Image: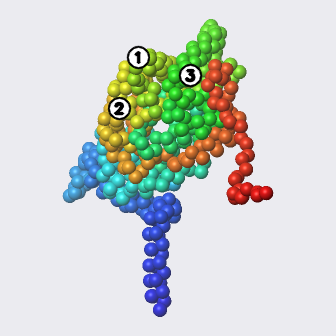
Amino acid sequence: MSGSLFLIVLVVLIAAVAVLRRLRPAWYWMAFGIVFAMLRVSFRYASVMDACGLTVPPSRLRLTLARIANRPAPPDSRTPRIVRMRPTRTGLVLRLKMRPGQDAFDFTASTDRLRHSFSMQGITSREIKSGVVELRMTGYDVLKRVQMPATLTRGEGLRVPVALREDGEVHYRDYRQVPHALNLGATESGKSVYQRQLVKELAALDVALVGIDCKEGVELFPLARRFSALADNPDTAAELLEVLVGRMADTYQVIRREQRISSDTPDAEITADIWGLPDHLRPVPVVLLVDEVAELALFANSAEKKRRERIITALVRLVQLGRAAGIYVEICGQRFGSELGDGITMLRAQLTGRVSHRVNDEASAKMAFGDISPDAVLATTQIPIERPGMAVVGDSTGGWVRIRTPFTSLRQAVTACNTHAHRTPDIAELAAFRPVMPSVSLVKAPGPATAPATA
């Protein structure tokens, strides 16, 4: 009786673990997965490294000692030394010391084989320093159900969390390091959710938000209480961009006036951007969000063509010179190629950050990553349609990674903007473009219809 009871309990326990792994993979990983994964890596390590070609022949000293000892079998090949194995909330971090003759590229090229051999969801490799590589392993599909960590490190300046990376780390948008970016994506790919997440996080910072939304303002105008300026048509957008170019020129005059380079000026006080200015002189940084850039580049007659030239010229000037003046540009669109006319490729070349959600054709992916990383183009075309918010992020260095933005409803973004509406700076140059908010009035709900009184 006791044996059958033990068997029933064991079956129930195994079933519960299987259900937990399917429905709550993060809980399963923290409860059981970490232990199983560390045991697999420890026991399989030597054979896996040998099978993946990540070992080196024994040294001459070991071969000489084996000959002197008259050993029949030669010494084993040497595997990379494990410096540290650290569990995380999503996987394992394995830090390895490479043997002489090995290269970090060998580990990068073997990540798929290592993933299969260690039975992990995914593995990424990067070189920490000379001779040391780090393998980041994920124990489950972290992008299937995005859960951002409860505590996030935002750091100094304009650094905001926007998504979760495939290796389990948080992806941050740092405007100080990557001042301008391009965000591409087809309809229903999650491009607007990414933009909402950006606005939601930026709303809590001391920054001026400026928006251009030529879809009659349906995306950005609900967030208007946190915006210092908004434009909902190309004509207003052209005027707004030219005002920003004028603000940029005035900011450079302030920087030049305060430099005052002399032999007794401390090095820390010499600056070429707004971040080196004293707090009382530093202009508030501006983040410009352009929704659907194609609406600014298309034209149907000569008057619209002249307006388009003004818009593209102003945008190119802002992305070329705006960083030092504290003006950062985030451009969104479904396509961003040369078919939009002159100046578009010049504008794209200045956008260091690249984010591409699911696209409808390979040509659109090449618009984002064709000039920096062919591998990122292939990864972009493989984004499944049932995973909105998933994207590939890259930069001009050629590095790229898959991310997925947590779903942010329009209500959540509106609530964040309303909560931080008091942070909206009043900028004199942008006063003419400040959105006018209607007064909130209580409207009595209509009651049941009553029959008219009869005499």
Q: Are the residues flagged by discs 1 and 3 in contact, CB closer than 8 Å?
A: no
Instruction: Identify the residue under disc 3.
Output: 240
Q: Amino acid at mark 3?
A: Leu
Viewer-closest of 84 and 414: 414
Q: Earlier in the sequence, mark 2 or mark 3?
A: 3
Q: Earlier in the sequence, mark 2 or mark 1?
A: 1
* Quarter of the view holding residue 348: top left
Q: Residue at x 56, y 50 (%)?
A: 149
Within 10 Å of the Cα at label 3, are there few (<14), some (14-19), or many (20+) other Cα atoms?
many
On the image, the x and y values in percent for residue 143 come to 45, 51
User: At numbered mark 3, what does the secondary structure look like: helix, strand or loop?
Assistant: helix
On the image, the x and y values in percent for residue 69 come to 25, 54
Within 10 Å of the Cα at label 2, are there few (<14), some (14-19), or many (20+) other Cα atoms?
some
Q: Residue at x 56, y 28 (%)?
A: 231
User: At numbered mark 1, what does the secondary structure look like: helix, strand or loop?
Assistant: helix
* Residue 302: numbered disc: 1
Q: Amino acid at mark 2?
A: Met
Instruction: Identify the residue under disc 2.
Output: 367
